[in-house]
Image (cartoon, rainbow, N blue to C red):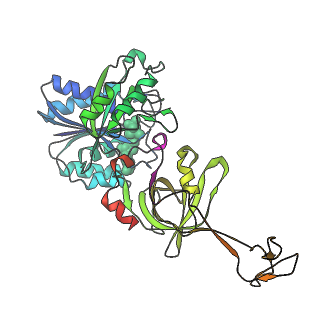
């Protein structure tokens, strides 16, 4: 059976993955064998999310009625029921529903009645609390299908520590990264000298280590020195897989979805107020604005280095009529040129324009030239893929250390 839970937390506390970890232990105590715990990330553009739009799915073997009772009891005991935006959902399905609903919740928007129709069709047990919105995530979680997967070891804090500053030794996190990278990622951001894996929100998570296998995340974890955790859970996840990306086309992008799009840079990138960098991507006469926001730090230099005519592939969410960049493939770089009036061969002074279409003339000797000086500039980027730093990475975005999958590479031709 699959047990799905979602929408249990609020900005003031709790985390659905913590409830999942508690439930794993209670199921095992009740003689129900837990096969796998899954952390299922859904559409990052959903407005109702508390933080990272996560739901949990526990695959288990045993009595469904007991599992359902235990899951509901866990949620009723731990969820932030008093928060207006917290609307928990609990599902226990004896068979896995078709993955279409998961794909829709991952890449698009769903509603509660669609979730309930699906649950009814597969004879699942379910309970939606308050406005029952959590049933969307809980249903998507039990329907989830991970053709590609990564792992996260989550360590949770003892309850008495929940409102106190987290004690995690910074140096030990940098050591964990150094000893296990590229098999783990996003523990720290070395380029920006920032710890990434320790949250600042008032939830029970102490830290989370992401990596390519349970063995590697455990290896990284073994280097971490911290306050004593209450418990630890290794989740199988769709994080770091780009599962949210749809192949897209400029001019046919829909708000709140995430895409990989190909096009040609039109005009020069601009740095606007707040340090956000934007450029225009064109394809077959239609255009879209691409944004590299200030938190993407050094990635903005990649955007700034683009010139008219560069063929690129970009990945990101389409929001407010802009594509918010997560990753960029520089497919074919155009020559960057600087066109200026030429130097007069007689006076060795730079000529000036003689008027539109009339070439150039020397103010000193009156000499004329039709051709400008065209200087080919050295490009500041090479063809290849570039990504935002770990501090700015979305949960679902696939880090370049995991390679670029064939379907994405195909966008670069
Ligand atoms: P945390 O990551 O800490 O668990 P969260 O960011 O996952 O919190 P939730 O509290 O789970 O946020 O809120 C997300 C809400 O949005 C849930 O009710 C979930 O059912 C719903 N939801 C998730 N995906 C979609 C979607 N694609 N369309 C509509 N609603 C969705």
Image location (x, y in percent) of residue 243: 33, 52
Any part of residue 33 in sight: yes
Q: Residue at x 52, y 76 (%)?
A: 285
**Residue in front for this viewpoint, 19 or 265:** 265
Q: Residue at x 35, y 31 (%)?
A: 179
Any part of residue 128 in sight: no
Residue 12 placement, left or right of 224: right
Q: Is residue 340 above or below residue 361?
A: above
Q: Is residue 393 magenta?
A: yes
Image location (x, y in percent) of residue 367: 83, 82
Image location (x, y in percent) of residue 218: 28, 29
The N terminus: image quadrant: top left
Q: Residue at x 16, y 30 (%)?
A: 66
Q: Is residue 77 magenta?
A: no
The C terminus: image quadrant: bottom left
**Where on the image, by quarter, is ligand 1?**
top left
Quarter occupied by residue 347: bottom right
Residue 135 placement, left or right of 397: left
Residues shaded magenta: 383-395
């Amino acid at each position: 059976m699959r047990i799905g839970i979602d929408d249990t937390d609020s900005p003031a506390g709790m985390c659905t993955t913590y409830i999942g970890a508690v439930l794993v232990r209670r199921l095992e105590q009740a003689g129900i064998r837990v096969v796998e715990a899954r952390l299922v990330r859904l559409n990052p553009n959903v407005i109702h999310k508390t933080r990272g739009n996560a739901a949990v799915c526990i695959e288990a073997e045993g009595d469904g009625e007991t599992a359902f009772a235990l899951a509901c009891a866990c949620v009723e005991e731990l969820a932030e029921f008093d928060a207006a935006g917290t609307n928990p959902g609990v599902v226990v399905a004896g068979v896995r529903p078709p993955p279409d609903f998961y794909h829709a919740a991952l890449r698009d928007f769903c509603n509660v009645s669609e979730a309930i129709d699906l649950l009814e069709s597969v004879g699942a047990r379910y309970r939606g609390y308050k406005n029952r919105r959590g049933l969307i995530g809980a249903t998507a979680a039990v329907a989830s299908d991970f053709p590609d997967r990564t792992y996260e070891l989550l360590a949770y804090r003892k309850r008495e520590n929940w409102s106190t500053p987290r004690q995690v030794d910074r140096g030990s996190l940098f050591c964990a990264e150094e000893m296990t990278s590229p098999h783990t990622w996003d523990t720290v951001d070395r380029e920006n000298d920032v710890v990434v894996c320790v949250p600042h929100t008032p939830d029970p998570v102490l830290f989370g280590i992401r990596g390519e296998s349970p063995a590697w995340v455990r290896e990284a974890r073994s280097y971490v020195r911290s306050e004593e955790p209450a418990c630890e859970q290794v989740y199988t996840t769709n994080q770091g897989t780009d599962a949210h990306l749809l192949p897209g086309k400029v001019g046919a992008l829909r708000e709140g979805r995430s895409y990989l799009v190909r096009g040609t840079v039109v005009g020069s990138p601009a740095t606007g107020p707040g340090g956000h960098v934007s450029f225009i991507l064109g394809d077959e006469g239609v255009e879209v604005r691409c944004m590299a926001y200030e938190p993407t730090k050094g990635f903005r230099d990649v955007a700034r280095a683009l010139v008219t005519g560069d063929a690129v592939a970009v990945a990101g969410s389409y929001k407010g009529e802009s594509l918010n960049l997560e990753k960029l493939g520089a497919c074919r770089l155009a020559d960057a040129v600087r066109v200026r009036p030429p130097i007069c061969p007689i006076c060795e002074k730079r000529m000036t324009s003689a008027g539109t279409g009339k070439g150039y003339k020397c103010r000193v000797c009156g000499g004329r030239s039709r051709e400008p000086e065209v200087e080919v500039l050295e490009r500041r980027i090479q063809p290849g893929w570039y990504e935002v730093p770990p501090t700015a990475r979305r949960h679902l975005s696939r880090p370049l250390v995991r390679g670029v999958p064939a379907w994405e590479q195909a966008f670069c031709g």
